[in-house]
Image (cartoon, rainbow, N blue to C red):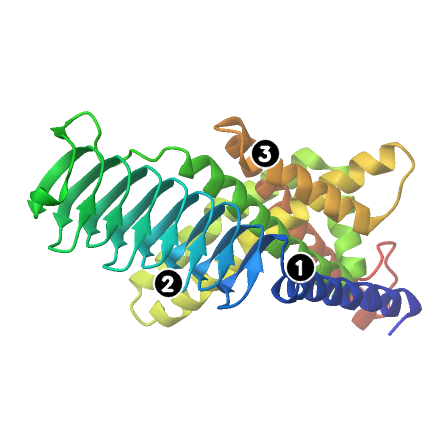
Amino acid sequence: MKRGENRGSRLVIALLVAIVVIGAVPATVTAQSDARAGGTVVVEEGETIDSLQAVGGTVIVRGTVTGDVSAAGGDVQIEETGQVDGDLEGGAGSVTIAGTVDGDVEVAAGSVTVAENGTVNGTFTAGAGTVVIDGTLEDDAEIGADTIRLGETASIAGDLRYDGDLEGNTDAVAGDIEEDPSLGVDVAPTVQPFAAWLFTVYSFVINLLLGAVLLALFPRFSGRVADSVATGPIRTGLIGLGVFIGVPILLIALAITIVGIPLSIIGTLVFALLLWIGVIYGLFAIAAWVLSLVGISNRWLALILGLLVGAGLSLVPIVGGVVNLLVLLLGLGAIARALSGHRRSARNRRSGTSSDEPTTD
């Protein structure tokens, strides 16, 4: 392996170690603000942090959060030992409150449950398919859901404003009960901007990891990708469009043949990975070209800059989607051109002829 490749490998290893260290520190230091992402995000029993912003398959609070909790995940759980002194804002498949939330609750989910031991001292706002209240709400509640069920142990100290089918122990409501058909199930709109922002950050980190691996393992190939965009962006984009349209057609044709179904399934998975890599390479190549205009040649800076711009574009409605599609087409076309150049160089080497183009990894 060449010296440049060794240096690149060391850089990516250092990057991975840094990310692991940065991710591990919040789990061991108390009284701090946390931003966590992963398959399962947990604030352990006995752990205390200032606030929590988390995205994961499951987000669990067993300890104490002295500030606000903003969480997005498959499941968000405030367990019996969990204490949130501030507000809870979440978007998830399911949200369960079995502990205590001293502030307001604004959640949007498939199902929302306030368990028998759960307590919300602030206002309670929920939009969901099903909302079950078995615990205590010390203030007003506003609920939009297909089904709203009040259990025998439920207690709502304030008013209840709702839309949906209200079932169960309506005597649990100390204040007024008002049906408002205008609520629908989307009565927690503030969750959506937060979730979009948090998923953007999470996607940036994952894309950065994959991009770093690509640059470290395939530096010359990555350079060829960048050159393809810089020297022929229109041609590269048209080739990318052909790949974007042609590959799915080919996969469908394989599936129609019955015997080609296994290959079609495998090809679909590979194509999905190619699309992901295409976006990363497209952003990297454009950033590398822009940096070259000001005399800067640094592939790592180009990767970070490109991904940051891509993350920002993902938050811009319509325009961001159109630009990201163009970036994807450039990335796919650049990959196709780089692979073609690699095959041509390999063929020339086998035939004993020379090639002006540099070889790839």
What distance separates the C-alpha of mark 3 from that of mark 1? 19 Å
- Give the amino acid type for the residue marked by disc 3 in the picture: Leu
- Give the amino acid type for the residue marked by disc 2 in the picture: Glu
The residue positioned 41% from the left and 34% from the top of the image is 190
**Can you identify the residue that label 2 sits on?**
79
Helix, strand or loop at mark 2: loop
225 above or below 196? below
**Can you identify the residue that label 1 sits on?**
209
Q: Please name whichever residue, 34 or 324, is drawn nearer the observer in this view of the structure.
A: 34
Q: Looking at the image, tell me whether mark 2 or mark 3 is earlier in sequence order.
A: 2
Question: Could you tell me residue 88's position as x and y percent?
Answer: 42, 45
Within-10-Å neighbours for mark 3: few <14, some 14–19, many 20+: some
The residue positioned 63% from the left and 56% from the top of the image is 31
Q: Is residue 141 visible?
A: yes
**Can you identify the residue that label 3 sits on?**
313
Q: How many marks?
A: 3
The residue positioned 90% from the left and 70% from the top of the image is 2
Question: Could you tell me residue 84's position as x and y percent?
Answer: 45, 51
Q: Is residue 343 visible?
A: no
